[in-house]
Image: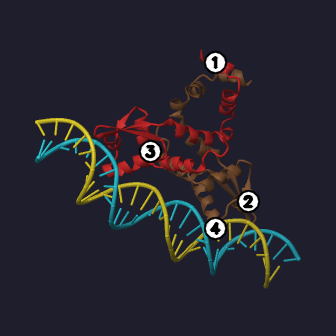
Chain colours: A brown, B red, C yellow, D cyan
Amino acid sequence: MVELQSAHLDQVFHALSDPTRRGMLRTLAGGERSISDLAAPFAMTLAGASKHLRMLEEARLVRREKRGRTHFCRLEPRALAEADEWLAFYRHFWSARLDALEAELLKPEPKALERKKK
Amino acid sequence: MVELQSAHLDQVFHALSDPTRRGMLRTLAGGERSISDLAAPFAMTLAGASKHLRMLEEARLVRREKRGRTHFCRLEPRALAEADEWLAFYRHFWSARLDALEAELLKPEPKALERKKK
DNA sequence: ACGTCATTCAACCGATAGGTTGACAATTCG
DNA sequence: CGAATTGTCAACCTATCGGTTGAATGACGT
């Protein structure tokens, strides 16, 4: 858990470092979208947008499924979760409260949490 | 809260996309360090490391204080918190449990939390 | 079969990243 | 003062980024 596939984190964080790509992820938060749908909000050629999508896909932030002639994309939250795990290490620097709760979540006994949920 | 200074997020995520810089942040999690201290673990000239530090500083992930001839760096958690806030929007995609707890944290009444902590 | 729609590919472009080297600046020590 | 320590600056190099254009691919509708 400590190494966290550094090379993949490189890809993920780099993918997140562009506002176009972050915008696309935001759109995908609303559900499956075609490439053209994702490209539409941006003043950019489709080929340009296509490249961004490919980076998101290679970073495994997005999954693509081709149905007929259109490619549908969906958010792949796993990679975001990895970025989040990396950040979690630092969480206590800015928020002792959230950190405490999270520590509880990750402890070997999820009893307290299950009580809360059920 | 919705726009989150996109240009700054660009810088932050880009800064995090390099393993050398992430390594430096990890070192800084242990407290204040000099530039040479931060550079030491990496097979790289000091000038190279110095450039990485400057990016971290410009992304406001690190603060620098010059005392005598040595520059001391400290972690600046605020920028990491911004990245975390951005990710928070997507948290429910991979963890309904954590999301629920966090929502509780951010609600106007922190009563339940205080009971847990004290 | 033909045209059109959705998307990629290949080539190109200027800007930036990530690294090096060598010279410079500032501070401390003898 | 002079030498060593700590770090930056400037110039350079190669690779990648973020974008364009124009042609190619593949599936659909008629």
Residue type at mark 1: give it: Glu
At 56% from the left edge and 47% from the top edge, which residue is drawn? Answer: B9
Mark 2 surroundings: few (<14), some (14-19) or many (≥20) residues within 10 A: some
**Element under disc 2:** helix
**Front tag of 1 and 2:** 1
* Residue lying at 63% horizontally and 56% vertically, measured from the top left: A20
Above or below for A65 versus A84: below
The residue labelled by disc 4 is A47
Task: Return the residue nearer the eye: B45 or B19.
Answer: B45
* Disc ID at residue A37: 2
Residue B17 screen position, x and y as percent: 49, 49
Q: Nearer the viewer, residue C15 or A79?
A: C15
Q: Is residue A58 above or below residue D19?
A: above
Instruction: Tell me the SS state at disc 3.
Output: helix
Relative to A30, B62 lies left or right: left
- Spatial CA distance of label 4 from label 1 is 52 Å
Q: Residues within 10 Å of mark 3 (few under 14, many from 20)?
A: some
Which-is-in-front pick, marks 4 and 1?
1
Tell me, yes or no, whether the two marked residues, 2 and 4, touch with CB atoms within 8 Å. no
Inter-mark Cα distance, 2 to 3 = 37 Å
- Chain letter of the residue beneath label 2 in the structure image: A
Mark 3 or mark 1, which is nearer the start of the sequence?
Answer: 3
The amino acid marked with disc number 3 is: Glu
